[in-house]
Image: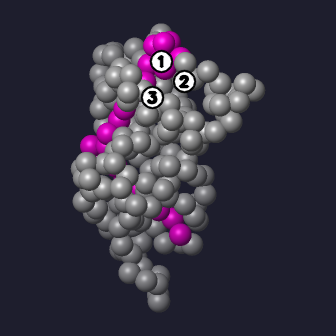
Amino acid sequence: MPADGSAQQPTAELDARYSSALNPRPGAAEVTASDWDEALRQLGAAEIFWVSTVRPDGRLHVTPVIAAWHDGALYFSTGTAEQKARNLAHDGHCALTTGGNSLTAGLDLVVEGTAERVSDPAVLEEVIAAFETKYGAHITSPEGTFHGMGDAFRKGDDVVFAVAPATAYGFGRDDGVYTHTRWAF
C-alpha cells in the first residue's frame, strides 16, 4: 500500500484538447499530465473545498466544507439535518473541488466519487486526528471556529462522509502553460 494509505495509484491521462499541448509555446517544455503526488499535496494543503450533491428532484446543491485527506479518501462532515446530508442519503454521488482563483498559477482539483457514511468509532478517531492535525487551533482551541467538532463526530451530531476518488481531475496553470489531467482509480 502506498505511503498515503490509498489502495492504488491512479492512471493519469493528459487531455490535450484542454491543455497547452495543442498549441505549445516556442521553447517550452513538453506538456505532461499533472503528477498525482502533487495533487495529494494540494488536497492536503487546501483549507476549503466545495461539495456538490444532487437533491432528490435532480437540482444541484453546492456548499463549502472543510475536508481532510486520510487513508485514500477525502473526509468531510455535515449536520444531520443539513441539505447535503439529506441529498447524500438519497444519492451518494458527489464531487469535492478545491483550488485557486488565478489564471496563471495553481492546480484546481475535482474529486468525484460516492460518499460513504463513516460510523466505525476507530475510523472516526483517525478522521478526528486528521482534522486536528490539518486545521489545528481552528478545531483544538476553545476559541477555534470548529471547536468541539470531534465530539460532534463521536456523538453523531455531525455525519462524517468518506469519498474515495473514482475519478479526479486536475486543471493546472503555470505561467501560461495549461494542463488538464484525468486520474482514473
Q: Tell me whether circle 1 and circle 3 mark residues in contact (CB < 8 Å).
A: no
Q: Is residue 116 magenta?
A: no
Q: Is residue 39 above or below residue 136?
A: below
Q: Amino acid at mark 1?
A: Arg
Counting from the top left corner in percent of width and height, residue 182 is at 31, 56
Counting from the top left corner in percent of width and height, residue 58 is at 33, 21
Q: Residue at x 33, y 16 (%)?
A: 89
Query: Relative to the observer, which residue lies in front, 148 or 33?
Result: 148
Local secondary structure at mark 1: helix
Tell me which segment is drawn in magenta. 152-174
Query: Relative to the observer, which residue lies in front, 77 or 176?
Result: 77
Q: Residue at x 34, y 48 (%)?
A: 5
Q: Tell me whether circle 2 and circle 1 mark residues in contact (CB < 8 Å).
A: yes
Local secondary structure at mark 3: helix
Q: Residues within 10 Å of mark 2 (few under 14, many from 20)?
A: many
Q: Amino acid at mark 3?
A: Glu
Residue under numbered circle 1: 154
Dot label at residue 43: none
Residue under numbered circle 2: 150
| Most distant residue in the right direction | 143
Q: Amino acid at mark 2?
A: Gly
Local secondary structure at mark 2: helix
Q: Residue at x 39, y 65 (%)?
A: 34
Q: Is residue 148 above or below residue 13?
A: above
Magenta stretch, overall SS:
strand
